[in-house]
Amino acid sequence: MADTSDFTAKSILYSYIFMLLALAAFYSWRALRSYNRLNFYHSRIIRIVSTKESVDNYLAIALYYISSAVASMKKAIEESATGQDMATARLNVRSAEDMSAALLVSNQVSNAQSTNSDMIVKHKQPLAYRAKIVWIPTAVVVLLSIFTNALFVYGNVLDRSPYRVAVEFCLLALGVVLVAMAYSYQNSIKNTLVNAKPRLAKESELYIKRRAFITEVIKTTGSQIKDLRLISQLLPTSPSATTFKNSFATLEGIHSSLQNLEKFSDFSSSQPLLDITSSANKSVSSYAALAKTKNITIKSKISGGVVSRIQPEEMRQIIDSLFKNAIKFGKSDSEVTLNVYRRFNAIIVSASDKGVGISALRLPSLLKPFSQGADPLRSIQDGIGLDLYSDKVITDKLGGSITITSRLGLGTTATITIPYQHDVSTEPPVLEQ
């Protein structure tokens, strides 16, 4: 009977400790819910901010190419014969020159206006043990434990062992500490979540403004292209005319690339389920003729049944740009390898060539135009043109990454990793247009 009473008394005392642990578990559960929601916002903020940075880089180098192309056309016109048609041509080219200069300025203004300079508001965290929601329940449990312990000791139900009392006290203290820590963490996550919601809305608003500038550039360059196209048709055959036409073709190519950028940077478009295996095989077939002109052997390692939710144009851009550059800049009589496969929750696309390669000093600046040591014209020679900048916009928007490894004289490998997604997302869109 005494053993039963002792067991019952200890069970009651330890149940108080269990109550504290249950309270700590409750606060931890609430913290976990807040953390998952916070992660939802943070992941989207990161995707928007990184995509905007890629869009900024894309626009910087695109506008640089526009300015260079217009300057070449202006020089070609000045070297051409005189006449009424040439006078009109010079006026149109001068207008295009003014347009490119205005776009450079407008880009700086747009970039500044779409940069979030707001400081993150830091909430002062109250001491956990001062919060009523912590100290009231813990104080009640501790007082109940002391009162019950004293009652059982004086009733000779429990012994007066200091060791037993010390163990119970330590367990109670541990329970109180766990409750305080769990509540403090929950409160910290909650306050951070308060900042995350308006931050996402702000970044979304600024990103929409930045995309509006892309539309403006497309309209502006499109109107100039119409006038310049007429000039290219009127120019007599000469070296200057050839220079003009080549520069005009560059301008048209950039205009087309900007239209792709407008599509690739759109977060609001739905993602259909795409057979990536089929897309990769089609890419291999379409570039077989280009590889044959350089006697390059294509080795493709494309896994079967690779599917994911992604826009077909985006996937085609990723595969084609890597594959095309590998063939273009690979050495003649060498080989190019295209790998497409799924690894866990990621789709991986890589292309390797055995070309001249890129020096280790230049690798870090490849996707950062006009940074220290970066030369946009040299980048084109290395095979890093607007295609790869488009890939960067797509991968950042999807939450993926681009990795480039190279050894001078041995070749280059470019790898793009994008998240695998099979189910239709039920979450709200990142951006609402």
Image: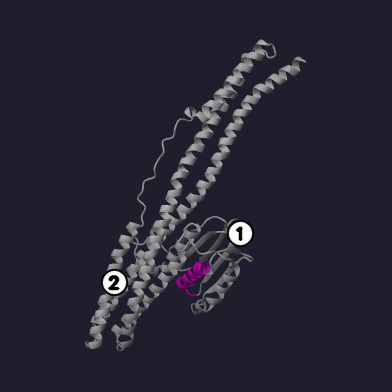
Question: 220 or 94: nearer the eye?
Answer: 220
Q: How packed is label 1: few (under 14 Cα within 10 Å), some, or many (20 or more)?
A: few
Quadrant hosting residue 276: bottom right
Instruction: Decide: is 227 above or below 383.
Output: below
Instruction: Decide: is 180 above or below 88.
Output: above
The earlier-in-sequence mark between 1 and 2 is: 2
Give the residue at x 57% y 56%. Answer: 426
The colour scheme used here is one colour
Q: How packed is label 2: few (under 14 Cα within 10 Å), some, or many (20 or more)?
A: some
Q: Please state the extent of the stretch shown in magenta in the rendering.
A: 313-332
From the image, tell me which residue sits under label 1: 423
Element assignment for label 2 = helix
Q: Amino acid at mark 1?
A: Asp
Question: 412 or 240: nearer the eye?
Answer: 240
Element assignment for label 1 = loop
* Marking on residue 140: none
Quadrant hosting residue 79: bottom left
Give the residue at x 44% y 32%. Answer: 126
From the image, tell me which residue sits under label 2: 99
Q: Position of residue 203 (x, y in %)?
A: 41, 54
Q: Position of residue 413 (x, y in %)?
A: 49, 63
Magenta stretch holds residue 330: yes
Question: 338 or 146: nearer the eye?
Answer: 146
Instruction: Decide: is 68 above or below 41.
Output: below
User: Left or right: 72 with respect to 24?
Assistant: left
Magenta stretch holds residue 139: no
Quarter of the N terminus within the rendering? top right
Instruction: Decide: is 2 above or below 258.
Output: above
| Outermost residue toward the right in this view | 1
